[in-house]
Structure formats: structure tokens, C-alpha cells
Image: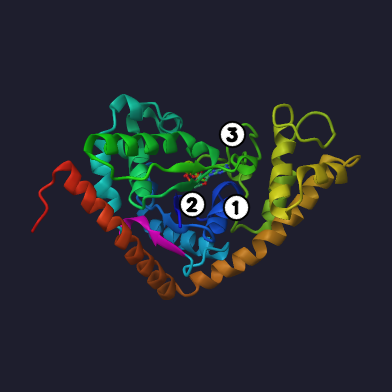
């Protein structure tokens, strides 16, 4: 079976609809066809300042949500990054074959560092795409399901795999992004040109999986929509309405055309009200299942430890090969 790997940061108390529709939903699907490795990337979550007291609980909540939306530990390997030391170990080697200018071209670093102030941004935020490359390459992943915002980082992962292979001999599978266009960029409800983001959207711009659905419905009612009153799908001229249609279509499993026909002659208010209901129907069982996993943290921690052990069984041999190839002095 081909391999898949992907990760998500525990940078908030909840995932949002962008994370689910752009990425995690595809993780669930790929379990059926791929040898799947999915990771709560807590080491990435300390790159831009974090609260130590809540990080561990956020990692648990992240894992609980992943299970609640359909990851099955029988069919995939689910683990927490910091429990598998090979990630940080391989990242060091890869950082030594990454150009400083090459890393400096990552637009996400430019965006995020601007927000924090360039002087105060950490070196970790700068090198995070290299750790991400290590995450992926350790598992020899063929496909990496992510949102559109990760395309450039995936390109770096591919370049680093190829470069290492050329310099030291064939070692890593060159991974391909698995980006499903329709939902690859869910936008902020208050700023339909920006992506919905855990760390940079305002609360009013995000629909969180774990928030009170009445609150989500209210945010959707206040979403920025476009001039005109017709409900049509056009991401250029009507990004706000198009974003709502995209979310609706994906959650209700109805085509955009079908929705546009159904709302012909109706107003934005009708669409928003119904979408609030669609979201409520989706998140209610997800919230119940998430709570059930969190009610038994010992069981959850055990499941994650078992995942880390399965992950290490693959990551360990890959790292060992990389160590040999670069000429490290392995103990006898
Ligand atoms: P942060 O703001 O902390 O970076 P994030 O919301 O970008 O958080 P990540 O944990 O960085 O979330 O990303 C997890 C996955 O969700 C990635 O595959 C990413 O591409 C995807 N993703 C994030 N935001 C969106 C979005 N608005 N639309 C589609 N996919 C998204
Ligand atoms: Mg992100």
C-alpha cells in the first residue's frame, strides 16, 4: 500500500472548519487506501510563543477530535510528534542541506513573522518547514493531504528529499501533495480573502468544531458577504458567499450547482440560517465523541503511546539509514 502522512498543530483548543474540510476529512478517507500516519505536531506548536500549561491538554484535545471525526487507530497510526524523537533528529540533518535563502522564501514565515514582529520571531518559526519535511520523509510518504497554504512547504519537502538522495544515495520517497481543490482554502468569515486560521483569524472569523453551534450560527449570520443579493458561486467577485457555499456543499454533501438552484430567488439571510443548521448537525456528534475520548485521558494517552511506538518502528530505521548515509559514527 502507498503511504500517507500528515500533521496538525495543537495551537488552539479546537480545530476549525478549514482544518477539517481542507485536510482532516481527507486523512479519514486515505486510511482506506493508504498505510496512514497522522501526527499531532506539538513541536511545531511552540514556534510562535505558546502556553506551556495548556499545550499538553491541547494535544490530547487535538487527538480526541481526530478520533471523533473518524480516524481509526486500527486503520492508521495516530501519535504525538514529541514522543517520536526521530523527527527532531532528522530535521537537523535536513537543515544542513537547506539554503538560508531557500528557507527565507517561505511565504508563511514572512506572514507569521510580520505578525509577531521580525525581531521577535523565533529561529524555530523560520526552520519549521524543515521539521515538517522531516515529519514527512521519515515515513517515506507518497501522499500528503494538506490545505492549499501548505503547497510551498510541500515543494520544499520534495526538494530536500531529492537533494538528499542525490548527495548521499537513494534514501527518501519524494512526497506528493494531496490537495483537493474545492475545499483547499476555506476563508475567514470576516475577511473572505484570507484563510481561516487557528492562530491569526479573529474569533468572529472562525467556525470552531468544538464551540457552541449557536455561536457558530451567529458568526455565520454575521459573515461578510458581497454586494448584490443573488446567491451565485464566484470566488473572484463574490468570495464571501462562495466560501459559505463551499462549506455548505462539503458538509451537506450537495453540489454547489444544486445549492445555487435551491437558493435561486432567496437571500443571503436564508443561506446563512440554513448553513448554521448544517454546521450544528455536523458538529453535535463530533463534540459528543470528542468529550467521550477526553473523559478517559488514561485510555487516550495509552492509545497515543501505542501510536508513537508504531511510528518509531518506521521512523527509526529511516533515520538510521540517513545517519549511515551522511557518515555518522553509529555505535556498534
Ligand atoms: P495555525 O494558524 O496555527 O498555523 P492552522 O489553522 O493553519 O493553524 P495547521 O495546524 O497549521 O492549522 O494546519 C493543519 C492542516 O489544516 C493543514 O493541512 C492546513 O493546510 C490545513 N488548513 C489550515 N487552514 C485551512 C483553511 N483555511 N482551509 C483549508 N485547509 C486549511
Ligand atoms: Mg497553519
Residue range of the region highlighted in magenta in the rendering: 76-83
**Which quadrant of the figure has residue 325?**
top left
Q: Is mark 2 within 8 Å of ligand 1?
A: yes
Give the answer, above or below, for where 7 lies relative to 126: below
Residue at the image point whose x is 38% and y is 59% from the top = 80
Q: Is mark 3 within 8 Å of ligand 1?
A: no
Q: Return the residue found at the far right.
A: 265
Gap in angstroms between the C-alphas marked 2 and 1: 10 Å
- Badge 3: few (under 14), some or many (20 or more) residues near its Cα, within 10 Å? some
Instruction: Determine which of the numbered discs, if any, sits on residue 12 in the image.
Output: 2
> Which of these two is toward me, 234 or 115?
234
Secondary structure at badge 1 equals loop
Q: CA distance from mark 1 to mark 3?
A: 16 Å
Residue that label 1 marks: 208
- Asked whether mark 1 and ligand 1 are closer than 8 Å, the reply comes as no
- Mark 3, secondary structure of its residue: loop
Please tell me which of labels 3 and 2 falls first in the chain.
Answer: 2
The residue drawn where x is 30% and y is 61% is 312
Whether the residues at callouts 2 and 1 have beta carbons within 8 Å, the answer is yes
User: What residue would you read off at disc 3?
Assistant: 194
Q: Residue at x 49, y 69 (%)?
A: 294
- Report if residue 303 lies within the magenta region: no
Real-space CA distance between mark 3 and mark 2, rounded to the nearest whole angstrom: 18 Å
Residue 83 placement (x, y as % from top left): 31, 60
Amino acid at each position: 500500500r502507498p503511504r500517507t502522512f500528515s500533521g496538525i498543530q495543537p495551537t488552539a483548543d479546537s480545530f476549525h472548519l478549514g482544518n477539517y474540510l481542507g485536510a482532516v476529512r481527507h486523512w479519514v478517507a486515505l486510511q482506506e487506501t493508504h498505510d496512514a500516519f497522522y501526527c499531532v505536531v506539538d513541536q511545531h506548536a511552540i514556534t510562535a510563543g505558546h502556553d506551556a500549561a495548556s499545550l499538553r491538554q491541547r494535544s490530547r484535545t487535538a487527538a480526541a477530535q481526530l478520533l471523533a471525526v473518524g480516524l481509526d487507530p486500527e486503520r492508521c497510526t495516530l501519535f504525538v510528534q514529541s514522543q517520536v524523537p526521530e523527527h527532531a533528529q532528522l530535521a537537523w540533518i535536513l537543515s544542513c542541506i537547506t539554503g538560508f535563502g531557500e528557507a527565507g522564501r517561505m511565504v508563511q514565515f514572512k506572514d507569521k513573522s510580520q505578525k509577531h514582529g521580525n525581531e521577535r520571531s523565533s529561529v524555530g518559526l523560520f526552520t519549521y518547514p524543515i521539521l515538517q519535511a522531516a515529519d514527512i520523509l521519515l515515513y517515506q510518504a507518497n501522499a500528503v493531504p494538506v490545505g492549499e497554504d501548505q503547497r510551498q512547504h510541500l515543494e520544499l519537502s520534495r526538494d530536500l528529499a531529492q537533494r538528499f538522495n542525490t548527495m548521499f544515495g537513494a534514501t527518501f520517497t519524494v512526497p506528493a501533495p494531496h490537495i483537493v481543490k474545492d475545499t483547499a482554502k476555506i476563508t475567514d468569515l470576516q475577511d473572505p480573502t484570507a484563510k481561516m486560521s487557528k492562530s491569526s483569524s479573529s474569533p468572529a472569523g472562525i467556525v470552531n468544531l468544538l464551540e457552541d453551534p449557536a455561536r457558530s450560527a451567529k458568526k455565520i449570520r454575521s459573515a461578510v458577504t458581497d454586494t448584490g443579493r443573488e446567491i451565485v458561486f464566484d470566488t473572484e467577485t463574490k468570495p464571501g458567499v462562495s466560501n459559505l457555499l463551499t462549506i455548505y456543499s462539503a458538509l451537506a454533501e450537495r453540489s454547489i450547482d444544486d445549492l445555487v438552484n435551491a437558493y435561486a430567488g432567496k437571500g443571503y439571510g436564508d443561506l446563512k440560517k440554513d448553513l448554521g443548521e448544517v454546521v450544528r448537525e455536523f458538529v453535535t456528534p463530533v463534540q459528543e465523541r470528542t468529550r467521550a475520548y477526553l473523559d478517559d485521558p488514561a485510555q487516550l494517552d495509552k492509545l497515543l503511546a501505542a501510536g508513537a511506538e508504531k511510528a518509531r518502528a518506521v521512523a527509526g530505521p529511516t533515520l538510521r539509514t540517513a545517519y549511515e548515509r551522511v557518515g555518522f559514527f553509529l555505535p556498534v
